[in-house]
Every structure is written in structure tokens, then in C-alpha cells.
Amino acid sequence: MEKIHILIADDMEAHRRRLERIINGVDSLSLAATAKSGYEAIAFAAVKKPDIILMDIEMESQMAGIKAASEIHKILPDTKIIMLTVHQDNNIVFAAFQTGIVDYLMKSAPKEEIIEAIYSASNNQSPIRPIIAQKIRQEFARIKKSEDQLTHFFKIVANLTQSELEVLKLLCSGLKRKEIAEIRAVELETIKKQISSLLKKFDKNNTREIITEVNELKLFELIGELS
């Protein structure tokens, strides 16, 4: 049986030594190298080309392992990376999965669980653990909500008159009502009526809310590109 070559990346010696003992205690596993930082992990991975990397998330920086995983997958896309963490921070773990890692484990996981994770990764059978499944569902829900909000927003924009659109653009550029009236050469009362119409169509209480939404979606930048 061909051995599975493993790279360990962890800045804490005690954790590295424990993982080394686990790997050395299994005949089918082989220790390729040990790294103390994300930078070393990238360098050793490039040279040793391991099958599996056991990667600590927090090393020389809080996200060092995630950054290293991202770089390693650019040069070794087939290398399987298992993240090791001391705490289940949903956002950090999900960020790690977005780099292409296949699994994550608590550093305190028993020896049997670590070995099983290595074999599963080697056989392309790593599980989607509950925390990640939940995070994926939340992310899809967020994207769907964002898309629905975007569709609703552009329906409103499509129903604005050209004058209202021009006033909205000037508001978003930071101009006051009086300044807008002067630029458009109309009475201040006309601008106030158009702004009232904008508030009603966007269903907002004040122009600041509209301006924030328009600027976040970069509406006028998009219109400029299309014109």
C-alpha cells in the first residue's frame, strides 16, 4: 500500500509533536515535513508536494493558515488540506473552506478522529460537518435575500422619472436641496416635491437611507458604464 505523505503546519511545538507521534504510529502514513508558520507551509509544500496538509489556522497571524491554504492551492490544487483550530469560529472556518480545504478538526480531537480525517481526505470522502452545512445554508439564504433586494431596488429605479433620477444623482453626490434647485434651474419647492416622490417610491423615511443604498449598489457608476 502506497503511503500517504503528510505535512504538518503549526506554530506550537506541543501540537506539532502530538501530530508527529500520531502519524509515525500508523504504517500507511508518512511525515513529509513540519512547518512553524504559514510561510514555511507554502515553501515546504512546494518542495515536498505532500498528499495531505494538517494546517493550523492561527500561526504568525490570525488568518495565516487560511492565507497559506489559498496560496498552496494555486500551486498544488490536488493537495488536500485539513484545517486545525482551537475554537469553532463559524466565519473563520467558513473562510477556510472558501480556499478549498476539505475538512477541519479541533486540535483536541482524539487520535482516531485525526487518522480517520486523513484517510477520508485521501479518498476524497471528507464529510461536510454540521457547522459548515449550516453556514452554507445561511450563505445561500443571504445571497437569495440580496438578489431579491436588488431586483426590488431596480424595479423602483425603473419607475423613476428622468427628473427624479437626476435629482437622486445630485443627492448622492452630496449636494443640498437648494444647490440642486440652482443647478437644475427650478424652484426649491419643485425639488422638495421630487424628493418627496423619491421617498415614497423607495418607501424610506429620509434621503440618507436612499443615498446609502444607492451608493452601496454603485448605481450611477453602473449607469455611467452603460451610457
Image: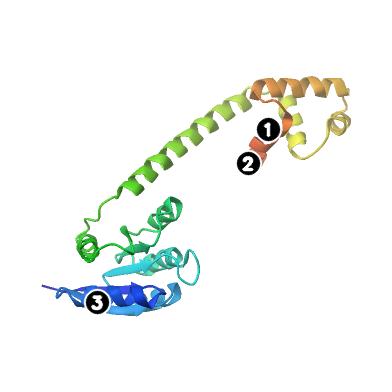
Label 1 element class: helix
Few, some or many residues within 10 Å of mark 3 (<14, 14–19, 20+): few
Q: Position of residue 185 (x, y in %)?
A: 88, 27
209 sits to left or right of 129? right
The amino acid beneath tag 3 is: Arg
Q: Position of residue 208 (x, y in %)?
A: 72, 34
What residue lies at 46% left-to-right and 67% top-to-bottom? 64
**Residue hosting label 1:** 209
Question: In the image shown, does 147 or 11 lie closer to the viewer?
Answer: 11
The amino acid beneath tag 2 is: Glu
Q: Which of the two discs, 2 and 1, labels the residue nearer the N terminus?
A: 1
Q: Which of the two discs, 2 and 3, labels the residue nearer the N terminus?
A: 3
**Where's the C terminus, which quadrant?**
top right
**Residue hosting label 2:** 216
Q: Which of the two discs, 1 and 3, labels the residue nearer the N terminus?
A: 3
**Where's the N terminus, which quadrant?**
bottom left
Query: Are the residues tagged 2 and 1 within 8 Å (C-beta)?
Result: no
140 sits to left or right of 222? left
What residue lies at 76% left-to-right and 34% top-to-bottom? 171
Mark 2–mark 3 distance (CA, rounded to whole Å): 52 Å
Mark nearest the camera among 2 and 1 is 1
Q: Quadrant of residue 50?
A: bottom left
Query: In this orientation, does residue 66 appear?
Result: yes
**Residue hosting label 3:** 21
Question: In the image shown, does 7 or 180 lie closer to the viewer?
Answer: 7
The amino acid beneath tag 1 is: Glu
Question: In the image shown, does 178 or 162 lie closer to the viewer?
Answer: 178
